[in-house]
Amino acid sequence: METVILAVVIAVVVLGAIGGLVIGSRRRRSLPPPPAAPDITAPPAEPHVGDEAETPHDEPRRTIEEVDLPGGSAPTAVAEPPAVEELPAPEIEIPEPTAGRLVRLRARLSRSQNALGKGLLTLLSREHLDEETWEEIEDTLLTADVGVQPTQELVEGLRERVKVLGTRTPEELRGLLREELLKLVGTDMDRTVKTEPEDRKPGIVMVVGVNGTGKTTTTGKLARVLVADGRTVVLGAADTFRAAAADQLQTWGERVGAYTVRGPEGGDPASVAFDAVKEGKEMGVDVVLIDTAGRLHTKTGLMDELGKVKRVVEKHAPLDEALLVLDATTGQNGLVQARVFAEVVDITGIVLTKLDGTAKGGIVVAVQRELGVPVKLVGLGEGADDLAPFEPEAFVDALIGE
């Protein structure tokens, strides 16, 4: 028994000694080697991820202005933000008076229309005016878009007058042709733009026409015409479907001090027109000009919209003018547009744009005959003051030249 106990004690002692040796050796192996003495001549070690990089003390520190940032130049020192300066209000322009404006622009009109007048005078100056010559005169007039019926009337009048006249000097022919053309164009039509109703303010003018004819620009120029004649104006940007139409109109208005009423893009045009007239009444201005949409000259939604605009505006007061803008360079196609618009809105006057860019000045006669209303304004260029009241005498004189 004692022998067994002694054997157990010896085994425990041996195991304990072996365990101590193992643990001791593990501890000795895990200990890191002592650090070597630093070599002051060696370069500093690169910092590891997570370590803090430290600029060596013996290097000069760089300022923030000297450090290049990626993708741009070095930032400048932070300064106080400059004080916001209020932009000056746009300078109000004073348009030139409209009286005699067409006379002043007659040279521009003459350049494009001289072919008609010179052609007619050349044919009438022939010694023998036979049937072939009269047919050539008819062709000249038809080419200028005078229209079939007016052309026949003019040729008949000329034939009668030439027969009575007998001998024909150049001066007599020019006077003869001037008189017959004036009859055709019409000197007894009231061509004033109605903007001053006697019993109320403001006068209300609606401008209609196909996009591309210069409708919005014409509305802005008409505002200048009215301001030049001493009237105050509010503009209604009821062309809500064409991008930037309201911005364009507002820019025209700001140049002459006219206030512009506008709505959201794609909004209800009738609502904008209604608000424009309401604002005009509250502000006590003389005239409200309403620019309308003109996407297509078809009897579809657009025509319904125009009818609605007219009805809504007339809840305030009757329309004083409904002006149809036509591009003179489109010739007979303009008459198709005129018929469609006349079915929806009671057109009271015509504005012919780009008359200086076509030799087909006879459209003045044709469109008046088609609608039974006068041409009241003509556009003779791209300048701000190139919209002029139509004057038959100045127009005919431009046709036949000096």
Image: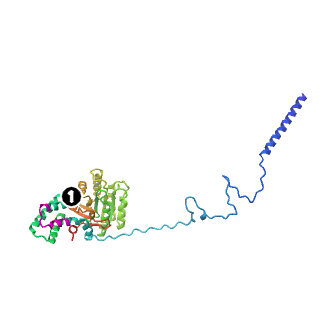
Q: Tell me the quadrant of the picture where the C terminus can be found.
A: bottom left
Residue range in magenta is 118-133
350 is higher (above) or lower (below) than 6: below
Is 270 situated left or right of 339 in this image?
A: right
Residue sitting at the far top: 1
Tell me if residue 125 is in the magenta stretch: yes
Is residue 179 or residue 374 the one in the foreground?
A: 179
Tell me if residue 27 is in the magenta stretch: no
Q: Position of residue 22 (x, y in %)?
A: 81, 40
Is residue 299 or residue 199 the one in the foreground?
A: 299
Report whether residue 29 is seen.
Answer: yes
Name the quadrant containing residue 389.
bottom left
Q: Position of residue 103 (x, y in %)?
A: 25, 70
Q: Main secondary structure of the magenta part?
A: helix
Q: Which amino acid type is marked by label 1?
A: Leu
Which residue is found at the position 9% from the left and 66% from the top? 163
Name the quadrant containing residue 149.
bottom left
Report whether residue 284 is seen.
Answer: no
294 is higher (above) or lower (below) than 129: above
Which residue is found at the position 53% from the left and 66% from the top? 81
Q: Tell me the quadrant of the picture where the N terminus can be found.
A: top right
389 is higher (above) or lower (below) than 51: below
Q: Which residue is mark 1?
A: 371
Residue sitting at the far right: 2
Which residue is found at the position 37% from the left and 63% from the top? 251
Name the quadrant containing residue 36.
bottom right
Is residue 43 or residue 12 the one in the foreground?
A: 43
Q: Residues within 10 Å of mark 1 (few under 14, many from 20)?
A: some
